[in-house]
Image (tube, helix red, strand yellow):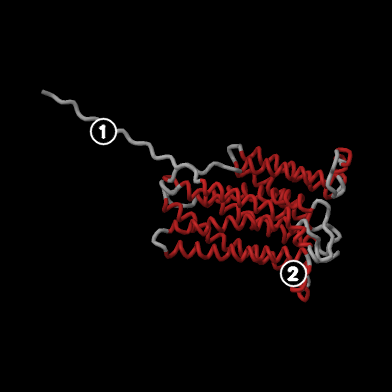
Amino acid sequence: MSTSPIPPPLPTAPAVRRPSPARAVAVLVLVAVAALVPLLGPSVALSGTGEAAAPGAGGIALLRTVVFAAVCVPAGEVFAGWLARRVRGMSDSGAAPRSWAAVASGAGCLAALGLAFVVATGNLVPRRLADMDIGGLYQTRDGALALIEVNAFLLAAVLARSRRPATQLLPLTAIVVAEALRAHPPPESTPLIGSALTLVHVVCSALWAGGLLYVLRTVWRWRDTAPHAGAALLGLYARVAAVLLAAVTATGVVSTLRRMPPDTVVDQLLTTAYGRTLAGKVLLVVVVAVLALVARARLRGAADPLTAYAPARAEVAVLGVVVAASALLTAVPVPIRW
């Protein structure tokens, strides 16, 4: 009597992990805080200083927050993707996280368009179409820079969907250059030096914040398939981030001394809206640096290097608030009149 062989058991599909409600709530809270900083920040920073707020300062700061975040996300994806390809075992880790670059660039295009409308109204908040001189944007320096940002974000959104997503770095570079030139108009003393400092500061900040966001998304994606590769990627990013932090700090200090003479820095940090906002941003960066040190210590000493994920996730959350504080700096009055 013959017996048929028992077929092997069918492989069971891996359990699908549902999104955590706590994580969704945390993301919503972070977005709300990042939006409240530019919206309410101008009135808080200007309170008691005797300085006048520009019309629609809160809305302009919110739009610039979106613009800065829209640069960070795609730039960070290209940068972190480049790091991931240099990690041993990356080929066995599985697919990369879904790109957010196209959505971010689309949001950036809309925010840049809103800022262009403000420029077309003479740096006032437009209330009707008749208030805007769209054709006049081509005839002014600020208008031309605003249009460059709108078109560059649109091109970046298209290139993000292409087979060569790294090409979106070209329009992103144009956006950063336009922002650096806008922040330092010709009447300022040595405007090209100020623009160069802002350029380096924004590039390093975008790679730092955007790169960490994509690295954490990648580590989370690889947590089951290649946890060691994920830990190696986080460690590689930490080494590069130390250099980026040094560059951000150096350019930030020099830019501050250009706007505030050394003998007035302490006083202006307390009595001007720009100084108060800058002081808040510096405190946030200190918190970020501490969290980065904690994450790096866990990478080196913990039995499970992925325990560094928690402080690194808190780091990227605080960096989101830093981006909002940076945008707020562009909406409050500059302490020195050129």
Instruction: Report x, y in % for residue 249.
Output: 65, 65
Tell me the residue at 70%/51% (across/down): 65
Residue bearing the label numbered 1: 8
Most distant residue in the left direction: 1
Mark 1 neighbour density, 10 Å: few (under 14) some (14–19) many (20 or more): few
* Quarter-of-image position of residue 47: bottom right
Q: Earlier in the sequence, mark 1 or mark 2?
A: 1
Image mark for residue 77: none
Tell me the residue at 77%/73% (across/down): 267
In depth, the one of 32 and 297 nearer the eye is: 32
Please say if 131 is above or below 6. below
Image mark for residue 269: 2
Please say if 239 is above or below 170. below
Q: Count how many numbered circles sit on residues in the image.
A: 2
Amino acid type, mark 1: Pro
Judge left or right: residue 297 versus residue 59. left
Q: Quadrant of the N terminus?
A: top left
Instruction: Report x, y in % for residue 26.
Output: 56, 51
Amino acid type, mark 2: Leu
Tell me the residue at 81%/63% (across/down): 190
Mark 1, mark 2: which one is toward the viewer? Answer: 2
Q: Quadrant of the C terminus?
A: bottom right
Q: Secondary structure at mark 2?
A: helix
Q: Secondary structure at mark 1?
A: loop
Instruction: Report x, y in % for residue 310.
Output: 49, 57
Instruction: Report x, y in % for residue 209.
Output: 60, 55
Tell me the residue at 77%/76% (across/down): 263
Mark 2 neighbour density, 10 Å: few (under 14) some (14–19) many (20 or more): some
